[in-house]
Image (spheres, helix red, strand yellow):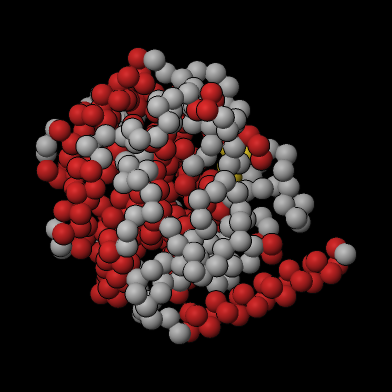
C-alpha cells in the first residue's frame, strides 16, 4: 500500500508540475524583471482586490495583512486612490482593533494586526487620531500583560489570556509594537515586543531546523513522509514579519542582532527549500504530499529575501536567482483579471491548494514582494 501511495503522489506531483509549467507558458502577464511589467501586474492585482468585496471584517487579521501590502503598493503606484481606499477601510474600523471579535480576546495579536496600516497612514498624513486608539490599546496591554504558558489551546477561556503562542502571531503583533515604538519614540513598546517575541521563539523555533512550528500541537506531529511538520505560510508569516520589525528598530537597539540572526538563519533554510519552478509548497518538508504551488508562503519568502538583498543583509549573488524564480512563479499564478490563485485558505497547517483558491493575505504578500523587487531595480541591484 505504501508503494502504491508513493507512486500516486509522485504521479500527482508530475501532473501538477506539468500543469503549472503550462500555465507559466500561457501566463497573461509578463514576468520580465523591469519596473513597467512589475507595476503593471501589481496594479492589476491591487485593483482586482479592491473591486472584490471583502470576505472578512475590515478589521480582521486577514485584511490587516492585505493592508500591509496595499500601503507598500500605494507608496510606489503614483496614485493616491490606494491611500484613499486604505483610509476608508480604517474609518470603517474607527481606527481601532477588531472589537467585533470575542471580547475576551483582549491580548489576541490577530485582532490588532490592522494597526500596521494605521501607523503607516499616520506617517503620511500626520493625523494623531489615526494611532490614538491603537496606542491606548497597547498601553492597556502593557499595564496588565498576559502571562503563563505558551501551550496552544483553542478554547474561549484560553483566548482571554492569549500570548503569541502560534507562529503567525509574529507577523500580526510585534510589527505593530515596533512601528508604534518608532513613531512615538517610546522604548516601552520595543521592550515588550522583544520580551514576547523571544518567549515565543524560545518555544516554537526549532534551532536545529531554523524553522518555526505553527504551535505546540505540532511538536510531535509528522508528515506522510515521516518529516516534521513545518507549514509554508506559517514560516512565511515569521519571515515576512522580521524585515518589518528590523527596519523599525533603532540602529543601537541592544537586541537588534537577535532579530537579524533569526532572519538570516531562516533565509538560508528557506532558500534551500525552493522548488525548481521557483515556488514553495504548503509543506516545506513534504512537497510530494502537497505538490501544487502555495503563493502566500512564496510571496512572503520572496518579499523577505528581496528586502534582505536591498538592505545588505543577504548576499545578492546567492539570493537574486531565487528572488527572480520566485517572482516568475508568482506571476504565473495570476489570473487575467488580476486574481492571485494558489493561495491556501485560512488554516494552521499544510493543506492542498488549487489555482482557484485566493485570499486577501496572499494578495498582501504579493504586493509586498513586487514592491520590494521594484526597489531592487531602483538601486541597480536588478
Q: Is residue 59 above or below residue 323?
A: above
Give the x, y percent position of residue 22.
53, 83
Q: Is residue 369 visible?
A: no
**Which sits in the foreground, 314 or 38?**
38
Residue closest to the far right: 1
Q: Residue at x 48, y 23 (%)?
A: 160
Of residues 100 and 287, the one nearer the viewer is 100
Q: Residue furthest left?
A: 126
- Quadrant the C terminus occupies: bottom left
Task: State left or right for residue 82 relative to residue 7.
Answer: left
Against 165, residue 309 (above or below) is below
Residue 267 image position (x, y, % from top left): 51, 51
Spot occupied by residue 199 in the image (x, y as percentages of width and height)? 52, 26
For the N terminus, which image quadrant? Answer: bottom right
Name the residue: 43% across, 31% down: 102
- Who is closer to the viewer here, 2 or 111? 111
For this view, does 378 lie left or right of residue 333?
left
* Picture mark count: 0
Question: For the point 21% across and 33% down, which residue is it?
Answer: 131
Residue lying at the far top in this picture: please name it.
Answer: 143
Image-quadrant location for residue 121: top left
303 over 6 or under it: above or below: above
Q: Residue at x 32, y 42 (%)?
A: 59
Kindly indicate the quadrant of the structure image that contains residue 287. bottom right
- Does 115 sit above or below residue 237? above
* For residue 231, side relative to residue 28 (left or right): right
Q: Residue 66: x and y, percent? A: 34, 52
* Residue situated in front as seen by the camera: 36 or 71: 71
Is residue 351 visible in the rendered image? The answer is yes
Amino acid at each position: 500500500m505504501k508503494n502504491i501511495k508513493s507512486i500516486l503522489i509522485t504521479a500527482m506531483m508530475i501532473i501538477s508540475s506539468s500543469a503549472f509549467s503550462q500555465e507559466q507558458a500561457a501566463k497573461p502577464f509578463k514576468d520580465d524583471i523591469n519596473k513597467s511589467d512589475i507595476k503593471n501586474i501589481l496594479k492589476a492585482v491591487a485593483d482586482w482586490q479592491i473591486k472584490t468585496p471583502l470576505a472578512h471584517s475590515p478589521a480582521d487579521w486577514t485584511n490587516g495583512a492585505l493592508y500591509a501590502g496595499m500601503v507598500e503598493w500605494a507608496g510606489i503606484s503614483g496614485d493616491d486612490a490606494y491611500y484613499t481606499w486604505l483610509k476608508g477601510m480604517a474609518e470603517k474600523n474607527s481606527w481601532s482593533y477588531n472589537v467585533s471579535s470575542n471580547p475576551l480576546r483582549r491580548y489576541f495579536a490577530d485582532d490588532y494586526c490592522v494597526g500596521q496600516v494605521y501607523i503607516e497612514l499616520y506617517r503620511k498624513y500626520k493625523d494623531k487620531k489615526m494611532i490614538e486608539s491603537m496606542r491606548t490599546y497597547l498601553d492597556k496591554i502593557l499595564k496588565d500583560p498576559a502571562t503563563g504558558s505558551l501551550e496552544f489551546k483553542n478554547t474561549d477561556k484560553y483566548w482571554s489570556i492569549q500570548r503569541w503562542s502560534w507562529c503567525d502571531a509574529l507577523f500580526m503583533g510585534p510589527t505593530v509594537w515596533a512601528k508604534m515604538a518608532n513613531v512615538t519614540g517610546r522604548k516601552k513598546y520595543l521592550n515588550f515586543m522583544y520580551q514576547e517575541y523571544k518567549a515565543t521563539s524560545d518555544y516554537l523555533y526549532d534551532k536545529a531546523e531554523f524553522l518555526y512550528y505553527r504551535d505546540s500541537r505540532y511538536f510531535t506531529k509528522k508528515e506522510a513522509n515521516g518529516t516534521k511538520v513545518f507549514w509554508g505560510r506559517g514560516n512565511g508569516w515569521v519571515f515576512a514579519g522580521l524585515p518589518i520589525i528590523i527596519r523599525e528598530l533603532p540602529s543601537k537597539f541592544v537586541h537588534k542582532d537577535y532579530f537579524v540572526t533569526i532572519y538570516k538563519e531562516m533565509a538560508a533554510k528557506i532558500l534551500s527549500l525552493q522548488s525548481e519552478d521557483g515556488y514553495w509548497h504548503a509543506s516545506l518538508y513534504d512537497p510530494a504530499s502537497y505538490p501544487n504551488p502555495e503563493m502566500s508562503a512564496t510571496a512572503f519568502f520572496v518579499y523577505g529575501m528581496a528586502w534582505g538583498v536591498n538592505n545588505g543583509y543577504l548576499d545578492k549573488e546567492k539570493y537574486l536567482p531565487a528572488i527572480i524564480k520566485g517572482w516568475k512563479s508568482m506571476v504565473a499564478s495570476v489570473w487575467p483579471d488580476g486574481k492571485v490563485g494558489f493561495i491556501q485558505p485560512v488554516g494552521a497547517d499544510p493543506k492542498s491548494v488549487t489555482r482557484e483558491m485566493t485570499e486577501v493575505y496572499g494578495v498582501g504578500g504579493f504586493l509586498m514582494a513586487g514592491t520590494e523587487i521594484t526597489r531592487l531595480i531602483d538601486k541597480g541591484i536588478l
